[in-house]
Amino acid sequence: MFITKDICPVPFDQQPLNEYIALKKSCFFSWSILSIDKYIRRICNIFFSLFIVLYACIYSTIISNKNILRICCYDVFIITFIFIVIFTRLYLGWSYIVKRLVSSTVFYEESGWYDGQIWIKNIESITKDRLIGLYEVVPFINRIKYSLFSSILCFMIELFMIYLL
C-alpha cells in the first residue's frame, strides 16, 4: 500500500492509507471494527469485568451504608462514564483518519521542524482513499457514534436514578 516517493512526497507513516492500516492494527482501535456480534460481546466483556472490579472497590470504600442497589447504581454510573471516554477516543481517532482519507490534500511534515507542507493527491490516490474512507471507515464511525450516544443517554438516566436514591 506504499506509494512511491516520486508520486507522493509524504513520509510513509504520515500517508493516510498507512495511518488507516496502523490504526486498524492497533490493539485499542481494532476491536471497534469487529463484526457487530463480536463488537457487542467485547463491550459486554468490558462492562462485566469493570463491574466486578469497581463493585469491590466501591463496596470497600462505602463504610456506613452498604445498600446494594446504591452500590450497583454508582458502579454502573462509573462504568458508563468510562465507556463515554472510550467511545469518544475511538470516534476522534477514526474521524481523524476518515478526514485525511477523504481530503484531496494531505498536510505533512518532512523533517519534524514544524515546517508543514501540503501535498495534493493525484486522481488515483483520491479515488482509492475516498473509497476506503467512505465504505470501510464511515460505517465504523457510525457504529461508534451510536454507541457513544447510547452511553450518554444511559449516563443521563443513571444520573437521574442516583439523584432519586
Image (tube, helix red, strand yellow):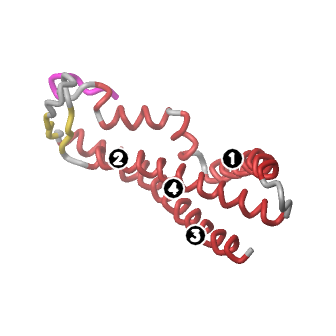
Sequence order check, earlier mark of 2 and 3: 2
Is residue 2 a member of the stretch shown in magenta?
yes
Q: Are the residues at dot 3 and dot 1 in contact (C-beta closer than 8 Å)?
A: no
Magenta stretch: helix, strand or loop mostly: loop
Residue annotated with mark 3: 153
For marks 4 and 3, give the CA distance.
14 Å
Residue type for callout 1: Ile
Query: Quick one: label 2, few (<14), some, or many (20+) residues within 10 Å?
Result: few
Residue annotated with mark 1: 46
* In-image side of 101 versus 124 (left or right): right
For marks 2 and 3, give the CA distance.
25 Å
Residue annotated with mark 4: 144
Locate residue 93, reporting x and y percent: 41, 45
* In-image side of 73 versus 150 (left or right): right
For marks 3 and 1, give the CA distance.
19 Å
In the image, 116 versus 129, the foreground residue is 116
Label placed on residue 96: 2
Q: Secondary structure at mark 1?
A: helix
Query: Quick one: label 4, few (<14), some, or many (20+) residues within 10 Å?
Result: many
Magenta range = 1-7
For marks 1 and 4, give the CA distance.
15 Å
For marks 2 and 1, give the CA distance.
25 Å
Q: Is residue 162 above or below residue 68?
A: below
Say which of marks 2 and 3 sits in front: 3
The residue shown at (31%, 37%) is 16
Q: Secondary structure at mark 4?
A: helix
Sequence order check, earlier mark of 3 and 1: 1
Quadrant assignment for the N terminus: top left
